[in-house]
């Protein structure tokens, strides 16, 4: 048996992402897992016209880590926020570098400070 198949079987617990996320007053549909057939290195995209975010669970035909999947979700949410607010500041290679840094940073802060979400969503 191919060892990579065995490894994938060991980590094949399917991660759940929400089906919808509200961004800027819009309901975005989350399609996960999505298989990008155009490029094997593409992990996600967002379409502001159809209000759809697509996230891959494989990259180069290898199962991605849950943390990478969540960072990609944050990345695509940031793109959606950028476009729905009309800022459109994350364009081109430089914009992608900024959004990747923010995605990793937001993921780290939220995962290392789990009570932060409770504080943010606290209602009197
Ligand atoms: Zn991007």
Image (cartoon, grey):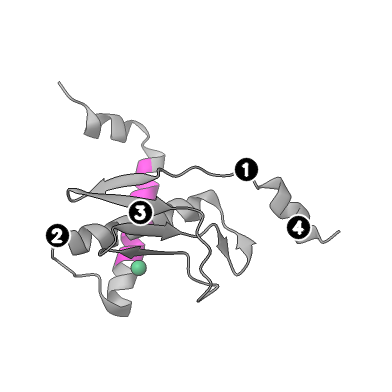
- The residue where tag 1 is placed is 13
Give the side of residue 41 with respect to residue 96, left or right: right
Q: Which mark is residue 85?
A: 2
Residue at 14% from the left image edge and 20% from the top image edge: 124
N-terminal label among 2 and 1 = 1
The image position of residue 46, as x and y in percent, is: 34, 63
N-terminal label among 4 and 3 = 4
The image position of residue 66, as x and y in percent, is: 53, 49
- The residue where tag 3 is placed is 74
Relative height, residue 72 to residue 20 (above, below): below
Q: Please provide the residue range marked out in magenta.
A: 99-110
Residue at 33% from the left image edge and 30% from the top image edge: 115
The image position of residue 27, as x and y in percent, is: 26, 48
When asked about the image quadrant of residue 79, the answer is: bottom left
Give the side of residue 37 with respect to residue 100, left or right: right
N-terminal label among 2 and 4 = 4
Q: Are marks 2 and 3 in contact (CB under 8 Å)?
A: no
Say few, some or many: other residues with alpha carbon within 10 Å of mark 1 (under 14 / 14 to 19 / 20 or more): few
Residue furthest to the right: 1
Q: Which mark is residue 5?
A: 4
For the residue pair 97 and 18, the one nearer the viewer reads as 18
N-terminal label among 3 and 1 = 1
What kind of secondary structure does the magenta stretch mostly adopt? helix
């Amino acid at each position: 048996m191919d060892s990579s198949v065995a490894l994938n079987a060991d980590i094949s617990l399917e991660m759940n992402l929400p089906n919808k996320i509200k961004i800027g007053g819009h309901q975005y549909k989350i399609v996960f897992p999505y298989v990008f057939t155009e490029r094997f290195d593409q992990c996600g995209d967002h379409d502001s016209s159809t209000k759809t975010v697509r996230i891959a669970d494989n990259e180069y035909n290898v199962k991605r880590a849950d943390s990478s999947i969540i960072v990609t979700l944050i990345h695509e949410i940031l793109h959606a926020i950028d476009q729905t607010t009309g800022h459109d500041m994350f364009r081109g290679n430089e914009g992608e570098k900024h959004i990747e840094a923010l995605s990793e940073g937001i993921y780290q802060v939220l995962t290392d400070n789990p009570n932060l979400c409770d504080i943010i969503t606290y209602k009197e």
